[in-house]
Image: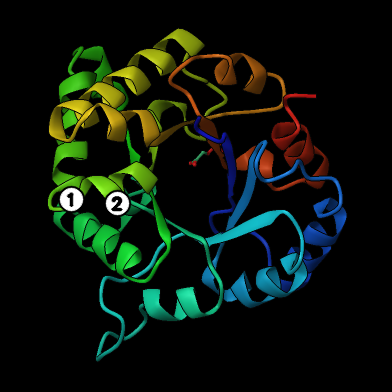
Amino acid sequence: MRTPIIAGNWKLHMNPEQTTEFVNAVKDKLPDSDKVESLICAPAVDLDALRKAAAGSNLHIGAENCYFEDEGAFTGETSPKVLSEMGMNYVIIGHSERREYFHETDEEINKKAKAIFANNMTPILCCGESLETREANKQEEWVVGQIKADVEGLTAEQVSKLVIAYEPIWAIGTGKTASSDQAEEMCKTIRETIKDLYNEETAENVRIQYGGSVKPANVKELMAKPDIDGGLVGGASLVPDSFLALVNYQD
Ligand code: PGA
């Protein structure tokens, strides 16, 4: 059985004080981790506050990005080794904003995935098509191409633990959610791709999130779909009550 995982992606919002306040407001109201994993991925400058505030609670913690080398002359980058030492559980990689504004390539994303696993954390690998690609009805080949390139060289054991987030770019921050059927269709295609690349067991284990304007009002419908195992949530994860409504969607 795959444990649902609802993750907040704070992007470039919040400071350490706000992080502590947020965690204090939610930490005693989270579901048990074996029922639903609740996760916040925060900016690097907030991670120390996040880890301290979340200690001993059901809140899982993660970063929004990292580099693929543990150390060296890489000015401005974040070490996956240090993230792991800090107690981070997850690192988001390949978010469409990083692909678009910071020109991240599938090759770099693939190296990051390997570095994150090597440091005993779990990557949340984002994929998704632009509006132009969807209008040309090329979304499946686009997303399958991203997945194939991004998981290249990962073992079946690693991919079993991986989290993949399908986020159609046209639905991110726009208020325009993909319909639950559109989201399910792509998540199913991603699972089939993992089955083709690895095997049935790996495909059954990999967790696939949908992201793009997920809110308390639509989370239940999305989570009812068989191939959607969670949500990656931007805007609606910034307010404690809204985050709590998302992670407690089963209540
Ligand atoms: P959104 O962002 O929920 O604000 O649409 C999702 C994401 O980019 O991960």
Q: Is residue 47 above or below residue 168?
A: below
Q: Which residue does the numbered mark 1 point to in the structure image?
A: 106
Instruction: Say whether residue 213 is left or right of residue 216.
Output: left
Instruction: Say whether residue 39 is left or right of residue 168.
Output: right
Q: Considering the image in quadrants, where does the C terminus appear?
A: top right
- In this view, the residue in front, 23 or 142, is 23
What is the crowding at mark 2: few (fewer than 14 residues within 10 Å), some, or many (at least 20)? some
Three-letter residue code for mark 2:
Gln
Report if the CB atoms under discs 2 and 1 are less than 8 Å apart: no
Q: Measuring 21% from the left and 20% from the top, which residue is drawn there?
A: 140
Q: Is mark 1 within 8 Å of ligand 1?
A: no
- The residues bearing labels 2 and 1 have C-alpha atoms spaced at a distance of 18 Å
Residue 129 shows in this picture: no
The disc at residue 158 is 2
Three-letter residue code for mark 1:
Asp
Mark 2 / mark 1, whichever is N-terminal: 1
Give the x, y percent position of residue 83.
Answer: 47, 74
Instruction: Say whether residue 23 is left or right of residue 119.
Output: right
